Image: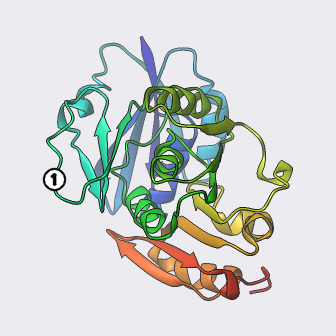
Amino acid sequence: MSEQLVLTVAAGIDAEVALCEMFDGGALAVEERAVGSGAVELIAGFAAGHDLDRVANALAAFGPVERRAVVNDGLDEWRRHAEVIRVGPVVVVPAWLEPPPSRVGELVSISIEPGRAFGIGDHPTTRLALARLVDHVVRGASVLDVGCGTGVLAIAAARLGAGNVVAIDHAADAIEVARANVAVNDVDVDVSTAALTEIEARFDIVVANLGGLVTPIDLCADLLRVARGGVLVVSGLLDDQVAGALATFGTGEVDRMAGWAAIVIRPDRLGSCTG
């Protein structure tokens, strides 16, 4: 038996941010249903024994939350519809699918098993961040992945030739899954639950693909600190958060996809969190 949390989000409340918070809290899958008058229900499934009280408390900021016990919830049904993701030369393959024949220009293949964590590389924020890693990772570069989830971006950086890759996430479930994926892909990535405030080194590339109640803007000072002298890639932004992010982080290039956005800021354009 697994359990669900059902969050009712009224019209005018940002359901996408609430959805991210559900995944950040350990949701296995989330279904969205319209319930009239512009409101939606977000139905999130969790494994039995998960700390639903903690997640429900975080979600209460978005609307009323109901807790349900369910049997045969079909939370793995989405796996039948998963597809291979291609971003430039990088091919991300869900672990239960056969790797496809390589195409011209495809150099890096990654196998990802999401388990109880979020991310097989198909979300727009991950695609946007991955595209920028493709642009900026050079052999031997140091890379920090903040909010690594299943490890897609960190593993891609390592496979693209980065020499020192560090991946951090506050969710223990994500760290467990990321470490397993690192092992399967036979790459060298340091995965831990270290807080960003504990990271003292600076990196050639810092990528922060974050959502939910903790956004990249909330971590501005520390992200700029570890990226100083390098490239900062910030993803997980909604379209209406871009202007605030640019004012906060510095002058950057903006990429958009399906209502989401990412910015990349080069070393000479990094700001000071005074925006």
Residue 184, position as x, y percentages in the image: 44, 26
Q: How is the image coloured?
A: rainbow
Q: How far across and how far down the image is residue 249, in percent?
A: 68, 79
Q: Residue 9's quadrant in the figure? A: bottom left
**Is residue 164 depicted above or below 113 in this figure?**
below
Q: Can you name the residue that lies furthest to the front here? A: 139
Which residue occupies the foreground of this view, 61 or 233? 233
Please state which of residues 113 and 142 is positioned toward the viewer in this rendering.
Answer: 142
Q: Residue at x 59, y 61 (%)?
A: 207
Determine whether 48 is above or below 17 in the image: above
Q: At x 54% / y 59%, what residue is drawn?
A: 139
Q: Can you see residue 64?
A: no
| Horizontal arrangement in the rendering, residue 123 relative to residue 245 (left or right) | left
In the image, 49 versus 67, the foreground residue is 49
Quadrant of the drawing holding the N terminus: top left
Q: Callout 1 environment at 10 Å: few (<14), some (14 to 19), or many (20+)? A: few
Q: Which residue is mark 1?
A: 103
Q: Is residue 247 left or right of residue 154?
A: right
The percent position of residue 44, horizontal first and vertical second, equals 43, 35
> Can the viewer see residue 86?
yes
For residue 102, above or below residue 185: below
Where does residue 148 sit, x and y in percent of width and height? 57, 46
Left or right: 34 as drawn, with respect to 62: left
Q: Is residue 258 above or below residue 156?
A: below
**What is the secondary structure assignment of the residue under circle 1?**
loop
The three-letter code of the residue at mark 1 reads Arg
